[in-house]
Amino acid sequence: MATRVRPLARSACIALQRQQQQQQRIIAPSTKRLTCALRTFRSTPQHRKQELRGYNDRDRYHGQYPRRTHLCGDLRADHEGQQVVLNGWVHSPRAMSQDLIFVPLGDASGTTQLVFRSGNPELRAEIQRLTPESVICAQGVVVKRPDGMINKQQSTGAIEVELEKIYCLNPASGSLPFWPSQTAATLPNEEIRLRYRYLDLRRPELQKNIRLRSVVVNTVRQYLVDHGFTEIETPTLFKSTPEGAREFIVPTRKPGAFYALPQSPQQHKQMLMAAGFDRYFQIARCFRDEDLRADRQPEFTQIDLEMSFITAQELQHVVQGFVTAVWKKALGVELDASHFPHMTYQEAMSTYGSDKPDVRFDMKIKEISGYLSDVVEEDAALDCLVVKQGSALTGGELKNMQKALELADEKDFAFVKINENNINAWPSKCGRLKHSSRIGQGETTEMNSKLDIQVGDLVLVHKRGRYLYGGNTLMGRVRLHLANMLQEKGLLNLDPNMFKFLWIESFPLFSPDEQSIRTWQATHHPFTAPFDQDIPLLTTEPARVRGQHYDLVLNGMEIGGGSIRIHSPVMQRFIFDNVLQLEKHEYQRFDHLLDALSAGCPPHGGIALGFDRLMSILCNASSIRDVIAFPKAAAGKDLVVNSPSQVTPEQLTEYYLQVIKNNDA
C-alpha cells in the first residue's frame, strides 16, 4: 500500500521530476522514473539529489568524534564542573531566545538537558538545524541549575550541560511518522507503531521491558546452570507430527519432502533423557500457526526443562526456585514455598469454573444440587455463584453480559437480584428452579445461610453436566466477566502488585474428542504418564484416569505446564493403539521416540514456561507484543519488513511448489 505523501514532499517531488526530464540525456535509464511515495519521510529533495548526482552528505559529521564519558541519565550535582561528552537522541529543542536554547538529549539511561548560552553563532546555527530524534555527540561542562529551576521529576533534574561543541552524527528526517518522546495519549495507533518499530522501541516503557527481559532470561539461565542443568539446543527444522496446533511447513528441494518448525522441543528433550543428559534446559524458540490473540504469537519463547529420576514435586521445587529468583531480581519481591499452593483440576473447575483460576478475588462457585435434587438429573450439577452487592449492576449491564457470553438462549442459566421481598423465595425467580417442589422458606433460609446470601447480592445459577472436562465452565466464564464489570465500576479492586501462584494438578489424562473422530483425545499431549494407581483404568474407564500433569498458574493465566512422561514403550504403544486409537501411519511418526524409550530411557518429566507471557506479567503489560522486540501484528504480519511476502516463480519451481488462488480470500 502506498504511503500518503505530504503536500510539501509531493510538490518538491514534482519539481525534481521536471528537473529530471530536462536532464534525461545525462541521467542513466535506470533512474528515469522517480518513485516518491515509498516512505514519506525519505522523499526529500536532499535525499533524491544525492541519489541522482552522487554522494554529497554535508548534514552528517564524518570522522573521529570525542568518546562518550557518561550516559545521559548518569549525571548528578556532584558532577558539577566536569567536562563531559554525551551521545544520544535529541528531543524537541526549545529556543527561549537567540542566546538561550535548551536541547534535551536522551539515551536508554535517561535524559539530560543541554543548554546553549555562549552566543557562538556557529554553534547556534548547528543547534537550530537539529531535528527531533537526530543523533548527536555533545561536549560541554556540567553546571547546577538554580534552585527554582530544579526538575525533581527527573533524575538529572539538578544539573544541565552548557554546550561547547556538538557533532551531528545522523540528522533525523523532519517528517517522522511520530516521535518516541510523545505522550501516550498522542501516539499513533499500534499498527503504525509496529510499522516503525525501531522508533517505538526508543520509548522508555519498551526500553525498560526489553532490558528487563534480558535480565530475567539471564537470571533463569544462571539459576539452572548453578543447579546442574545443561543448556542444549534442539533442531529448528523438525518433522510434522500430530500434536494439535497447526504447524509451519518448510519445503525442501526434494519433491514432496517437508520439514516442520517445532511447536515445542518435546520429543527431542525426551530423547536427551534417553541419552543420559539428566538435567536439560533451553530458552527455546517455538512456532505454532494459530489465530492470534493478545497473548499469542506465531513464534514464541519458552523456558524448557526436562529431568530424569525425579518426581513432580521435585521438579516443581526447581521451578519455584528460579521463579523466586526472578521475582527478587526483577521486582524486589520475596517469595517462598507458601506462595505456591496446590489445587486439583476437579477443585479448580468446580470451585472457580476454570483450570487456571484467578484466586485474587473470592466469588467461589458452590454446588446446590442437594437442595433442589428434584429438578437436577443424576448426571447433572447445579452451580450457584453469589456476587456480593452485585445488585449494583444494572439490568442493561447484565443483558450485555448475556449477549457477550452468548447466554440469551441458555435455558439452564438464570440470575436474580436479592431484595427484601424475594430473599426467602429467590429460587422461584430462577428459571427452571421454580418447578422444584422443594422450594420453601426453610430450604431457602438454609441456602441463604450456607451461601451467605444477603439483600443487595446477585445470585446466578446454572445446571451443567457433572462430568468436568475442558478449560472452563459456563459459570467460570460468567465469574470472570462479572469480575471485570465490578472492576470497571470500582466495586472490586485488585492490587496490581498481588501475585497469586497456583499449581493445578491431577488433570484427566483423556478428554472427549472435540472433532468426534474418535472417543478420546489426549488432554495435553500423548506422552503424559497416568498415576500409577489409575493404570488399570486405561482398559476399563479412560475417563477416570488422572494424568501426572501440572500447570503453574499466576493471576488467572497459565504461565507453564508440564508432566511426568511415559517412559515405558509398552504403555506408550498401548495408549496410541487402544485409547487414542491412532492409525498406524499416525503413530509411526513417533517411531524414533518409541525406539529411544526402548533403549533404556529413565523415568523423567519436564515443564515449559511461556517466557513472553511471564514477561508481560512482570512488566504489567497489556499484551505480550509489548515485551517482544519485533512482534507480529494481526494475521501474523511483520509490518516492519512486510512479511510474509511472495517469492519468485523461480523459487517456487526450485521447491516444486505451485500457488493456488483462493477465490474466497
Image: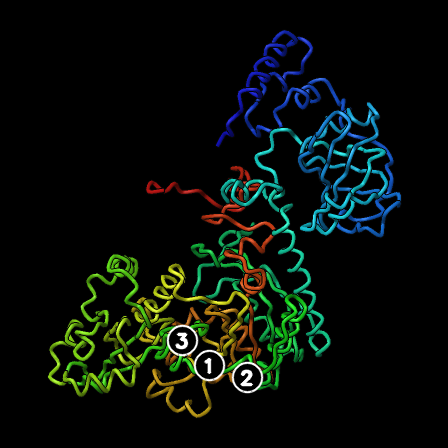
> At numbered mark 1, what does the secondary structure look like: helix, strand or loop?
strand
Q: Residue furthest front?
A: 148
Residue bearing mark 1: 505
Residue bearing mark 2: 312
> Is there a contact, CB below 8 Å, between mark 2 and mark 1?
yes
**Mark 2–mark 3 distance (CA, rounded to whole Å):** 28 Å
Q: Mark 2 vs mark 1: which is more N-terminal? A: 2
| Foreground residue among 609 and 403 | 403
Residue bearing mark 3: 362
Q: Is residue 528 above or below residue 95?
A: below
> At numbered mark 3, what does the secondary structure look like: helix, strand or loop?
loop
| Foreground residue among 137 and 464 | 137
**Is the residue marked by circle 1 packed among few (<14), some (14-19), or many (20+) residues within 10 Å?**
many
- Which amino acid type is shown beneath numbered disc 3? Asp
In the rendered image, is residue 486 in sight? yes
Q: Mark 2 vs mark 3: which is more N-terminal? A: 2
Q: Is residue 268 left or right of residue 535?
A: right
At 42% from the left and 89% from the top, the residue drawn is 535
Q: Mark 3 vs mark 1: which is more N-terminal? A: 3
**Mark 3–mark 1 distance (CA, rounded to whole Å):** 20 Å
**Mark 2–mark 1 distance (CA, rounded to whole Å):** 10 Å
Q: Position of residue 609 (x, y in %)?
A: 56, 69
